Amino acid sequence: MAIPKSVVDSIHQHIDIVDVIGDFVRLKKKGANYWACCPFHGEKTPSFAVNPAKNIFKCFGCGKSGDAITFVMEHEKLSYPDTLRYLAKKYGIQYTEENVAPSDAHQQHLRDSLYIVLNYAKNFYCECLHHSEEGQSIGMSYFKERGFSLEVIKKFELGYSLNEWDALLKNALAANYNIEILEKAGLVQSRDNANDKAARKYYDRFRGRVMFPIHSVTGKVLAFGARILNNDKSQPKYINSPETEIYHKSDIVYGIYQAKNDIRTKNNCYLVEGYTDVISMHQAGVQNVVASSGTSLTVEQIRLIKRYCENITVLYDGDTAGIKAAMRGIDMILEEGMNVSVVLFTDGEDPDSFVRKHGAAAFIQYLENNTKDFITFKTSVYLTDAGNNPLKKAPVIREIVTTISKIPDAIKRSLFFKTCSQLLDIDEQVLITEYNKIVLQKRKDTHKNNLKEASAGEHAQQEKDDDLPASLSDITTTEKDIHEKALLKILMLYGSEKIDENLSVCHYIISETEDIESHSELFLRIINEVKKQWHEGNEIHKNFFLHHPDPEISAFAKDAFFERYSLSEHWIKYGISVASEIDMLSQNVPKYILRYKRLIVRMMMEKARKQFSDKNIPDEQLQELLMHYKQLQGLYTEINRLLGIVVG
């Protein structure tokens, strides 16, 4: 299915990379760039930068780079066409596209096929809820008893699965969907494990349940949670989709698609336990809320929330299980560098039941009155058990200090030590001393683990080292790559610019490097692309390389064009002028070429020196080699002179 080129061009024109990436990551402006903690690898110090002027991003930690389209593809694991569809929808770009025949779904990439059948299932369950007699009398009645409005039901795309063995299966097969994809999506399962696929008997996984679609950040359906409504004790109350190619329950939180904008705006996320808690809070007007999707809280879920805010408020039942869950979650959230508060509900209530019982206004008031910072919460819980018993109080102090030790920020730790000192009525220095013991023990444990890993890997590393060449020529190969990349960057950015009235950057670099044979393969590929553009009379432009069909050339361009540092805004404010790179081309390009040639000559000299060590070399060949070496020496000296380099 092809998206018209005019639509693709329109998408490229509308894209604001800060706006696109800002839907997934909390960006902060610093200088010319926007910064965040990288969403592609775990980190606590921001090294992920977005350059709006060049419409590219780069992480200086893991090396990921690209444009807005690359980001969405990588982050959401979408195909190129699906990414374009997402961006077209985001920017309201209307276009006509041929529908994919359902029978062809299985021929597409597995991930695309899973998204297609899950979206079909979501629509089927919605249809059953709104337009079937069973859905209306059972499913819709349940939602109305919960107080859910039609608006919020549609917002979360809630549905109902008919109480039949194969209602979804029959309809999907009639629509020519592939049964293997339905099974891989977790929508159907087989009665037996017969090797003969034709002999397998399939049936719906979800039957007679209200359906809660679980969405990705971009709104795609990844999976389902399903609640049974009858009193059949042999069936679990809730069942969820199994893990699939696109659904990993530890990575996603329920409601993130509907909540992300409010979370970002309010810089706080309420974290609850169940699907109905999320929906009831939305119904009450509190929309910055997500649930841990039927699992214990995970680091991946915390990091997902961290992309949008700095603060998490966990809402748990006030029973023993709820308190334990809150305690466990607090330490994990703090370790990820976030601020955490807690609200507990008493008398066996949860957010859903509280809203239904007391109403939206009372619920919001309860949140405001009962939110506690983690240190106050932990202290009050532990001291209730310990009382004034010193033997019980000592472990409480260690436990709370251990929690504080997980906070990466030293200033925040210091403030919490003061608070803890007051709450526990204990000298602050005692707490700091205990903290130092914990940190010291951590370092010792880490050191021991590192020694074990180093010992285990020593033999393997030795084998690797034995294979590494150590001559100067191999060291300068790395230098050569650096010089070549610098030349390519200049060529791609400024190829059409003039060094003087009659000579372009492109013409100069190509002519000066044509006789050098030691180029990398990538260097040659890019040079050939430049030559082609040049001979066809086209302008050498960075966008040609940024969106080049060769992924290696495109990746190189995105990486090369990104500038980590920029001039301070104060320099501009006070009129301090600095010559730009383009202003210095006539001086810098010849220097780049000379430095590159100097390096090539050094490598050739090293190669000749190696040949001198061959005892079997004939005298006549040795004389020729010496003459060649002297010529190289002379050339090396001349290049140094032109560069102003004094060699002692």
Image (cartoon, rainbow, N blue to C red):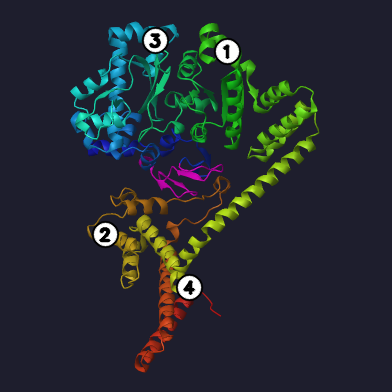
- Describe the element under mark 1 as helix, strand or loop: loop
Quadrant location of the C terminus? bottom right
Q: Position of residue 482 (x, y in %)?
A: 44, 63
Whether residue 98 is visible to the viewer of this picture, yes or no, is no
Is the Cβ of the residue at disc 3 closer than 8 Å to that at disc 1? no
**Residue 107 location, quadrant:** top left
The secondary structure that most of the magenta stretch takes on is: loop
The CA distance from mark 1 to mark 4 is 79 Å
Is the Cβ of the residue at disc 4 closer than 8 Å to that at disc 2? no
Q: Position of residue 421 (x, y in %)?
A: 77, 31
Q: Earlier in the sequence, mark 3 or mark 1?
A: 3
Q: Earlier in the sequence, mark 3 or mark 2?
A: 3
Looking at the rendering, the stretch of residues picked out in magenta corresponds to 40-69
Q: Residue at x 42, y 86 (%)?
A: 612
Mark 2 lies on residue: 534
Q: Which amino acid type corresponds to the residue marked 4 in the rendered image?
A: Leu
Viewer-nearest residue: 591 or 343: 343
Using residue 528 as the reference point, say whether residue 51 is left or right of it: right
Q: Which amino acid type corresponds to the residue marked 1 in the rendered image?
A: Gly
Mark 1 lies on residue: 348
The CA distance from mark 3 to mark 2 is 73 Å
- Describe the element under mark 2 as helix, strand or loop: helix
Q: Which amino acid type corresponds to the residue marked 3 in the rendered image?
A: Asn
Whether residue 72 is visible to the viewer of this picture, yes or no, is yes
Mark 3 lies on residue: 230
Q: Which amino acid type corresponds to the residue marked 2 in the rendered image?
A: Trp
